[in-house]
Structures are given as C-alpha cells and as structure tokens.
C-alpha cells in the first residue's frame, strides 16, 4: 500500500506512533498532522512523526488520501462529520478510538458521496500521553480491530485492513457491537478496576506501595477525560462486564468469610491458568 498524503488528526501517543511507523515503513509520501496546540504539533515535527502541522482541520484534511482520527471518543462523531465535508471523493476516513458502536452509528449514512469511513482500534498504547512517547514500532505484531457493518464498502474495508497491516499490525474484523463487548472486558473494566483500587489508597500508605500495587494500577494514570468518554460510550457493555466482576468478587468474599481454602485455591488456580496462558505483546 502507498499513500500520497496521510493526515493524522491528533498527534499524541497513538497519532504520533502512526506517523513514525508510516515514515519508517515508507507508507506515505507526505504526513500531515492536525492538532489543537501548536506546542504538540511542534513536538511531533521535532520527533519526525509529521512533515507539517496545522491547527486548522479544514486545511489539514484537504487533499488527503487517508485521514486517521486519534482524538478522544467523546467528540469524534462531530469531528469526522465536519472533516468529511472538506475531503474529496475517494478519501478514506478511519480512527483509533476505543469504542465503536456509538461512533459508527453516528457516522454511517451521513458522509458525502464517495467518502468512505471504517472504524478501527489498534490494541496498543499506554497510560502516557503526547508525541514525546510515540513509538514507530508500537504496532509491530499488535492486533488492530477493524469494524464492519452491512453498510461497509468492501473496498474501504480492504484499504483499512491494508493500512494497519502496513504499519505492522495484525488485523481482525469484527462488528462494532462485538468489539465493544470484548473491549469492555479486556480494556475498559481493567481500567475501572485499577481506578477503583488507586482511589481507595490512603495517603498514609503511599510509601508502602510496591510493584504489585503499582503494576495493577498503572492504567489508572491515563487521561481521566479520555476514559470518562470511553466509559460513557460503552456504558451497557461495561455494566455487563462489571456485573461479572462483582460476581467473582463475591465468590472470593464468601470463600474468605467461610474460611474455604479449597474454594480460594480453585479461584486462584483458574486465574493463574488464564493469566499464564495469555499471549505476549497483545496491546493494552
């Protein structure tokens, strides 16, 4: 795959990594960044993640062959719809957001003729923010979910798949609803649990936190504004996952209250088996 102009809207950790990966792999002739702070664009330029930057969305997407939106999910629908009025027929729009169903429903059927949109979500990243933490190898071997609905054009799905593969990703195609149900368990619930654990830490115990606490709560250091939007957009699936989690917590509580070592062992052994069986390098 070869792209003339690639525009990245939001050149933080993910957007900056896309730019660096595209440059490293010779994917695009020109990489353009759109941002909301000149300092962020300057940093992305200094890192080599983009060739040029602008604070003007219209100027940033005009003439682009592919536009990738790497901004918080809360305002993504309006952003994509606005940008779609500034691009030409044949432009592919995609994203890197952590929720899909609400977003895809808000965009599909509302784009100009000839402008394609396909939802995407690379399972890569960290709690860090900004282009300073961008990594051109971030997507190497990582899984990216590409979403398909009955309205998704086959050629657009193929282009989107090829784009992420060109950045080093493995790609899996799912419906937006299946994506959200899965990510509620594998990403959104873990963040909620980490935030809960971090939130109950008394100030008097801060000096006693070691590897276990810090590893378990690492993702709670993520941007609260970003995660509030994710939780709201994936509310139903997250509530379902939270119910399952609460049921498992109840099993632990009952085993402890009843001093049932055998039940505790079963629960811990099951968790050990599942955790040690996870493949490595699968993202956040």
Image (cartoon, rainbow, N blue to C red):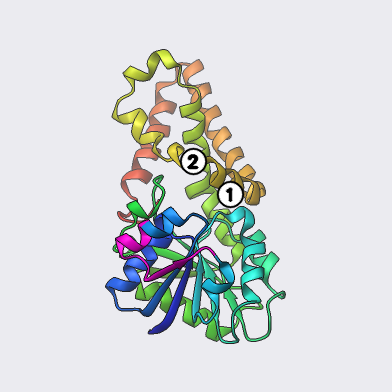
Q: On residue 49, which mark appears?
A: none
Residue 9 location in percent, x, y? 50, 65
Q: CA distance from mark 1 to mark 2?
A: 10 Å
Name the residue nearer the viewer: 147 or 19.
19
Residue 47 painted magenta:
yes
Q: Earlier in the sequence, mark 1 or mark 2?
A: 2
- Tell me which corner region of the image, top left, top right, bottom left or bottom right, holds residue 245: top right
Residue 244 location in percent, x, y? 57, 40
Q: Which residue is rendered at x = 41% and y = 34% of the image?
A: 217
Instruction: Determine crowd level at label 2: few under 14, some 14-19, many 20+ residues with C-alpha closer than 10 A.
Output: many
Q: Which residue is rendered at x = 44% and y = 66% of the image?
A: 53
Q: Which quadrant does the N terminus fall into? A: bottom left
Q: Are marks 1 and 2 in contact (CB under 8 Å)?
A: yes
Q: Is residue 15 left or right of residue 184?
A: left
Q: Which residue is rendered at x = 71% and y = 75% of the image?
A: 109
- Tell me which corner region of the image, top left, top right, bottom left or bottom right, holds residue 153: bottom right
Asked which secondary structure carries label 1, the reply is helix
Residue for badge 1: 230
Segment tinted magenta in the rendering: 43-55
Instruction: Determine crowd level at label 1: few under 14, some 14-19, many 20+ residues with C-alpha closer than 10 A.
Output: many
Residue 8 location in percent, x, y? 47, 68
Residue for badge 2: 191
């Amino acid at each position: 795959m070869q792209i003339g102009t690639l525009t990245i809207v939001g050149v933080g950790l993910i957007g900056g990594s896309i730019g660096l990966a595209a440059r490293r792999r010779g994917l695009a002739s020109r990489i353009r960044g759109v941002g909301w702070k000149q300092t962020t664009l300057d940093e992305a330029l200094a890192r080599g993640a983009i060739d040029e930057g602008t604070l003007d969305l219209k100027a940033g997407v005009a003439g682009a062959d592919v536009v990738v939106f790497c901004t918080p999910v809360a305002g993504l629908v309006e952003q994509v719809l606005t940008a779609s009025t500034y691009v030409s027929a044949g432009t592919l729009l995609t994203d890197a957001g952590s929720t899909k169903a609400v977003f895809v429903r808000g965009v599909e059927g509302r784009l100009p003729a000839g402008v394609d949109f396909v939802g995407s979500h690379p399972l890569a990243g960290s709690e860090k923010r900004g282009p300073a933490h961008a990594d051109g190898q971030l997507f190497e071997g990582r899984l990216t979910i590409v979403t398909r609905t009955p309205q998704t054009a086959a050629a657009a799905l193929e282009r989107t798949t090829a784009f992420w593969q060109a950045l080093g990703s493995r790609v899996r195609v799912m419906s937006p609803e299946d994506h959200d149900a899965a990510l509620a368990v594998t990403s959104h619930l873990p963040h909620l649990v980490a935030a809960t654990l971090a939130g109950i830490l008394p100030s008097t115990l801060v000096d006693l936190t070691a590897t276990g606490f810090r590893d378990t709560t690492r993702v709670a250091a993520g941007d609260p504004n970003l995660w509030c939007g994710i939780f709201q957009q994936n509310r139903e699936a997250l509530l379902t996952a939270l119910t399952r989690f609460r049921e498992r917590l109840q099993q632990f509580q009952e085993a402890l209250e009843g001093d049932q070592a055998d039940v505790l062992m079963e629960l811990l052994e099951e968790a050990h088996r599942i955790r040690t069986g996870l493949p490595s390098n699968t993202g956040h």
